[in-house]
Image (cartoon, rainbow, N blue to C red):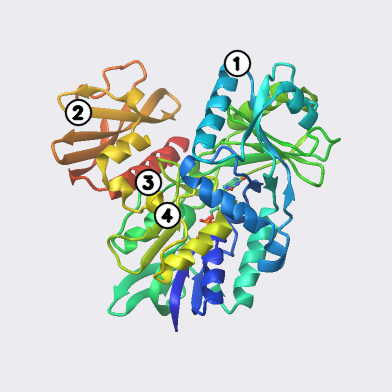
């Protein structure tokens, strides 16, 4: 079977791209190893948020926000969307200063969607917040939607537009051919297409590696909780914080969704996530400090889902520089849901060979190939850096206890020798501050060679494996 475009991944990015391409006359097949929306797209917290976005994403988010108002026409469902202004609270004068600077920066770039507000306005919007809140930054047009309804609407609309969706169909092999691409599925069938879109979410690095274009996408498992239905505590306003992790969103059914950056350990290969109760306890504690009236809230459910992340927290959206005709739309780092309608639109423009209406330069797939970009992007954190004999040791990846006896720190490092880079992970005793004094503690050395972004991916894989090992 053949199609103009093969899309791997039936999340909201794959479906959004498919709808746009089908409406422009292309034949499209989507392959989804589970069911459309099974992962991040159907299980996120539904935040339709322009507030707090990385500057590089704002123009996409604002354009997408307009599209959320028209879903009833474009995907034949309102997706459960409603406006719930997002208020980022300041807990101190120092927080307030951060918010004022943010607004100044946005205004200087011509954006006016985030507005600093004083305590009086905060109380008008959210009368139950704690006494210590001094002000905030609000985006009045932000909202919430129902992720399950939304991903279902996108998938059914794609089918309605003539897209073929193969659910429970994993692409196990992808190769280039003289006329484009050939993929083989878990059922042993083969399909051909002129172009291929990688919309595989948390699996995007792994998938693109098949085609010789490894991406440094790593998996994370953002984790959320939801309360029982309760009396209205939030007056329709969603809350976030400036200096600490917390997101509180009031769903229309009277429950409150709690999250905002908490993550759980996982095993991507086995598709398993172990909810970390300590993370949930942390979130609950902060929640009560912000909304004391939630002290007796009953948590009904915790959940988590896989998401593809990148070190610089903005996605990869663009054509591969290594494989012509291969397009990536991945690495949304836990905030892609809101931008999905717009990402589908620009992806379709790219695939059709048109100039995208907004520049995708900041989301270039090859940006991590530049070691100095990786450094700036925070792939390796400066505070963990130690420069000795040309060595740079970086990034604390986690604390693990092996055999319940000794605590270890697991560190990832990158060592540069001129043009050559060595990547690895090693265990280090917390009391041992010399870090890379020698390599005795190295658990495994991954690669010695020229700068190669795939090694970052390999590194995250190995870290995943250690995390799994440590849990046994
Ligand atoms: C808990 C949580 C909360 C979040 N909250 C928000 C929020 O409030 N606001 C917001 O804007 N964003 C949020 N996000 C982020 C948002 O959900 C994601 O950025 C977005 O859904 C990514 O869509 P996607 O299509 O790229 O990925 P996915 O939905 O994960 O889709 C990728 C699909 O590819 C499939 N696949 C992978 N490999 C293969 C293969 N080899 N063959 C076939 N299929 C394959 C997978 O099965 C998967 O279904 C949140 C994410 C999580 C996890």
Does residue 472 appear to the left or right of 291 in the view shown?
left
User: Label 3, label 1: how many angstroms apart (C-alpha)?
Assistant: 41 Å
Q: Which mark is residue 359?
A: 4
Q: Please name the residue that numbered disc 1 is placed on.
A: 93
User: Label 4, label 1: how many angstroms apart (C-alpha)?
Assistant: 37 Å
Disc 3 element: helix
**Callout 2 touching callout 4 (CB < 8 Å):** no
Work out whether residue 1 or residue 251 is closer to the camera in this orientation and state it.
251
Q: Please name the residue that numbered disc 2 is placed on.
A: 391
Q: Position of residue 13 (x, y in %)?
A: 53, 60
- Circle nearer the N terminus (4, 1): 1
**Callout 3 touching callout 1 (CB < 8 Å):** no
**Callout 3 touching callout 4 (CB < 8 Å):** no
Q: Which mark is residue 268?
A: none
Q: Position of residue 423 (x, y in %)?
A: 25, 39
- Circle nearer the N terminus (2, 4): 4
- Circle nearer the N terminus (3, 1): 1
Camera-side mark, 1 or 2: 1
- Circle nearer the N terminus (2, 3): 2
Camera-side mark, 4 or 1: 4
- Circle nearer the N terminus (1, 2): 1
Q: Please name the residue that numbered disc 3 is placed on.
A: 461
Disc 1 element: helix
């Amino acid at each position: 079977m053949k199609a103009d475009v093969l899309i791997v991944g039936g999340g909201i990015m794959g479906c959004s791209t498919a709808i746009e391409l089908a409406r422009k006359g292309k034949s499209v097949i989507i392959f989804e190893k589970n069911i459309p929306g099974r992962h991040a797209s159907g299980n996120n917290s539904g935040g339709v948020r322009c507030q707090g976005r990385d500057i590089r994403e704002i123009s996409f988010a604002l354009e997408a926000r307009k599209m959320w108002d028209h879903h009833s026409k474009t995907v034949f469902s309102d997706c459960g969307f409603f406006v719930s202004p997002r208020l980022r609270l300041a807990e101190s004068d120092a927080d307030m200063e951060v918010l004022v600077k943010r607004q100044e920066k946005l205004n200087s770039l011509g954006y006016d969607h985030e507005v600093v507000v004083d305590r009086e306005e905060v109380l008008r919007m959210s009368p139950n917040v704690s006494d210590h809140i001094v002000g905030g930054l609000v985006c009045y047009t932000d909202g919430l939607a129902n992720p399950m309804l939304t991903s279902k609407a996108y998938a059914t609309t794609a089918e309605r537009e003539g897209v073929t969706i193969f659910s429970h169909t994993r692409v196990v092999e992808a190769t280039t051919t003289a006329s484009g691409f050939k993929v083989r599925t878990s059922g042993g069938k083969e399909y051909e297409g002129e172009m291929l879109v990688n919309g595989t979410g948390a699996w995007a690095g792994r998938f693109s590696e098949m085609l010789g274009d490894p991406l440094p996408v790593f998996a994370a498992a953002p984790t959320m909780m939801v309360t029982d239905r309760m009396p209205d505590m939030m007056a329709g306003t969603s809350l976030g914080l400036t200096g600490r992790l917390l997101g509180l969103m009031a769903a229309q059914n009277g429950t409150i969704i709690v999250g905002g950056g908490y993550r759980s350990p996982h095993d991507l290969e086995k598709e398993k996530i172990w909810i970390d109760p300590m993370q949930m306890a942390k979130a609950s504690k902060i929640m009560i400090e912000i909304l004391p009236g939630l002290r007796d809230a009953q948590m009904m459910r915790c959940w988590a889902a896989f998401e593809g992340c990148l070190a610089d927290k903005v996605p990869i959206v663009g054509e591969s520089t290594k494989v012509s005709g291969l397009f990536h739309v991945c690495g949304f780092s836990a905030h892609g849901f809101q931008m999905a309608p717009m990402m589908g639109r620009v992806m379709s423009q790219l695939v059709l060979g048109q100039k995208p209406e907004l520049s995708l330069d900041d989301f270039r797939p090859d940006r991590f190939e530049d070691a100095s970009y990786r450094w700036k992007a925070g792939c390796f954190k400066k505070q963990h850096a130690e420069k000795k004999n040309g060595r740079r040791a970086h990034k604390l990846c986690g604390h693990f206890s092996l055999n319940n006896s000794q605590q270890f720190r697991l560190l990832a490092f990158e060592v540069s020798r001129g043009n050559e880079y060595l990547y690895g992970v090693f265990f280090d005793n917390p009391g041992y501050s010399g870090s890379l004094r020698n390599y005795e503690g190295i658990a495994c050395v991954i690669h010695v060679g020229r700068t190669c972004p795939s090694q970052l991916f390999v590194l995250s894989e190995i870290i995943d494996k250690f995390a799994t090992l440590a849990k046994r």
